[in-house]
């Protein structure tokens, strides 16, 4: 039961819910998430760690970048259920729609183009 409580605690913060909603769109690195949330890098890193520890997201290191994606954890069915239903529950909230607006199809860090293609914070 403690695992379930940790997942619920991880989703109790609006910034962490925002990260999950961003990752619903596609895999992203922190350099894309930071400007969209408008938070400092250490704060976003702390949120990413909490989500990883709860089993909601996974990170994959490639060179100097860590690419984050939603967990494919099949050992905890409630995680899969939450991740599937979350967009239905809050996907139409104005804050969420603005957060995920105009996300480029490709991850600029995947091709080493992060310096050229850094996303700007949503307006």
Image (cartoon, helix red, strand yellow):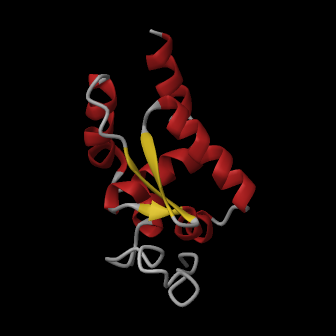
From the viewer's side, name the closer residue of 96 and 114. 114
Badge count:
0
Residue 28, picture quadrant: bottom left
The N terminus - image quarter? top left
The C terminus - image quarter? bottom right
Q: Identify the residue shown where x is 69% and y is 61%.
A: 39
Residue 110, picture quadrant: bottom left
Q: Is residue 65 left or right of residue 89?
A: right
Residue 22: horizontal and vertical position, in percent?
42, 59
Q: Identify the residue shown where x is 52% and y is 39%.
A: 51
From the viewer's side, name the closer residue of 15 and 52. 52
Q: Identify the residue shown where x is 59% and y is 63%.
A: 37
From the viewer's side, name the closer residue of 8 and 64. 64
Residue 96: horizontal and vertical position, in percent?
43, 59
Q: Is residue 18 left or right of residue 25?
A: right
Q: Identify the residue shown where x is 54% and y is 46%.
A: 16
State whether residue 36 appears in this view: yes
The single residue placed furthest to the top in the displayed view is 1
20 over 52 or under it: above or below? below
Residue 111: horizontal and vertical position, in percent?
42, 80
State whether residue 94 appears in this view: no
Q: Is residue 109 left or right of residue 15?
A: left
Residue 70: horizontal and vertical position, in percent?
37, 47
């Amino acid at each position: 039961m403690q695992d379930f409580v940790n997942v619920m605690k991880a989703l109790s913060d609006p910034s962490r819910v925002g990260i999950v909603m961003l990752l619903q769109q596609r895999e992203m690195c922190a350099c894309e998430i930071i400007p969209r949330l408008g938070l400092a890098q250490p704060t976003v890193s702390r949120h990413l760690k909490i989500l990883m520890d709860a089993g909601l997201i996974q990170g994959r290191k490639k060179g100097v970048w860590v690419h984050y994606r939603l967990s494919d954890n099949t050992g905890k069915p409630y995680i899969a259920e939450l991740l599937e239903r979350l967009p239905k529950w809050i996907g139409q909230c104005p804050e969420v729609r603005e957060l995920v607006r105009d996300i480029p199809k490709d991850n600029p860090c995947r091709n080493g183009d992060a310096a050229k293609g850094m996303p700007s914070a949503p307006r």
